[in-house]
Amino acid sequence: MDALTVKTQKPTGLYQLVVGIEEGANHPELAGMTAAQLELLKIDSKPKSVAVIGKDFGSLIAIGIADRKKLKDFGAAGVRAATKDQPLVLDLRGFTEQEISDVALGALIGGKTKTPYKKKHDAPSSITLLVDEGVTPDLADIEVLAQEVVMVRELINTPANDLWPEKLAEIVEEHFKKTKVETEVWNEKRLEKEKCGGILAVGKGSARGPRLVIMRYRGGGKHLGLVGKGITFDTGGLSLKPADGMVGMKYDMAGSATVFGAVSAIAKLGLKVDVTAVMAIAENMPSGQATRPGDVITMRNGKTVEVINTDAEGRLVLGDGLDVLAEYKPDHIVDVATLTGAATIALGNRYAGVMGHGAAIEHMLDAARDAEELLWHMPLPEELKQVLDSDIADMTNAKVGNRAGGMLVGGWFLSEYVNPEQSWAHLDIAGPANNAGSAYSVNPPGATAIMLRSLVEMARKLASN
């Protein structure tokens, strides 16, 4: 993550200056330009308007701001438009401290995610916020949040040959050493002792065994429970995905990574809330040891499941994870998962879906609005529950050939592992977890860490109530 500095004077030497163009107003840096010149350079207030003009100090980058409610996007656009390896200055004179914070967050998380697999990282050599005299924005919390978002993106972008269940668990343990977050890792033997039949069934096809990680932060106050799906690579198991469907399946651990990052941010911010989080981690591979379609497994809560589709594996690891979390008796439960391809059919690639029951739904919707992340409330229609009926077990994990409400059927499956009276929200982030296209809003190509900011915002609100 690039560091920010705040100054009241422009730097000397060559630099790039980003200015915002608002409706009906020209920036002082553009003084003297006629309407025809502005039109020729395509300088206007439209959010996607970006124009670069050569100046004696380097270059002027004019970016449209339709209104000041999207300033995170403005900061992100400024970083992406900048020439690489040169200082960047964002002109925020006339902005309030809150507006400056919004721009700063966008600038910190809107650029391209670093990768160790490339020798060069395309980014400005430094980022400076130019503010009015006497304006002293406190960016400490913003920088913590941005740091966690970037960390999670880098983790999710890591290819599966360098990230497997045991490795992911080790990363979490190492990260929380000498912090207020306690961690506990269950290996295969402990998973067997705990009768985590779902996680074991998914992981048994891989030579790299599954893990379950528990993270506990005690800040006092309300108790928030989190569960994340952590499939470090998903081939579909014996229900093998086609070649194009397997591309990008390193992102199938995004739910666990997001939960990990949220706990880390909440702890660093010192929020007055208790958090217990579970990462249910496995690699879904085909082999002579893999779970077969038609096998019946017993989940940790005692329910038997006829595994019709081994590619509907996320709900199996989450079912066990939810059962483990229930023992800690949280006030609210939120699980996060790239659960279903059906989520993209229903909501596209930018909205996450939320379903469940109790107060957690409104808490998440409210937090997502404030965090400016796209979340849509989906129902759990009663008639879809019967899709999971089995003749030989308590339930199936899917119905092959059923294309109706796949995301909602996944939600119904998970509801079997949550007390009906429990405040519970299930987030299906399959669409927006990975941005396979061009950058948009504050999201670069690749992993987005979607819902991390919303989870932290939910914890912040719980801490203040």
Image (cartoon, helix red, strand yellow):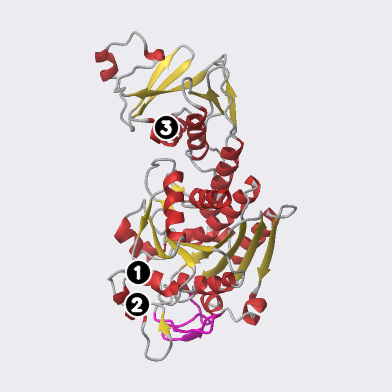
What amino acid does circle 1 point to? Leu
Residue at (54, 50) in percent of width and height: 456
Locate residue 63, reporting x and y percent.
38, 26
Can residue 117 be seen by looking at this rendering? no
N-terminal-most mark, 2 or 1? 1
Q: Residues within 10 Å of mark 1 (few under 14, many from 20)?
A: some
In the image, 201: left or right of 243?
right
In the image, 200: left or right of 62?
right
Q: Is residue 376 above or below residue 424?
A: above
What amino acid does circle 3 point to? Phe
Q: Residues within 10 Å of mark 2 (few under 14, many from 20)?
A: some
In the foreground, 331 or 119: 331
- State the residue position of label 2: 385
User: Where are the magenta residues, as a range?
Assistant: 285-308
The mark found on residue 57 in the picture is none
In the foreground, 451 or 212: 451
Name the residue furthest right: 178
Secondary structure found at label 3: helix
- State the residue position of label 3: 74
N-terminal-most mark, 3 or 1? 3
Secondary structure found at label 2: helix
Q: CA distance from mark 3 to mark 1?
A: 37 Å
Residue at (48, 38) in percent of width and height: 111
- State the residue position of label 1: 380
Locate residue 154, reporting x and y percent.
55, 49
Numbered circles on residues, count:
3
Is label 2 in contact with label 1 (beta carbons under 8 Å)? Answer: yes
| Picture quadrant where residue 429 is located | bottom left
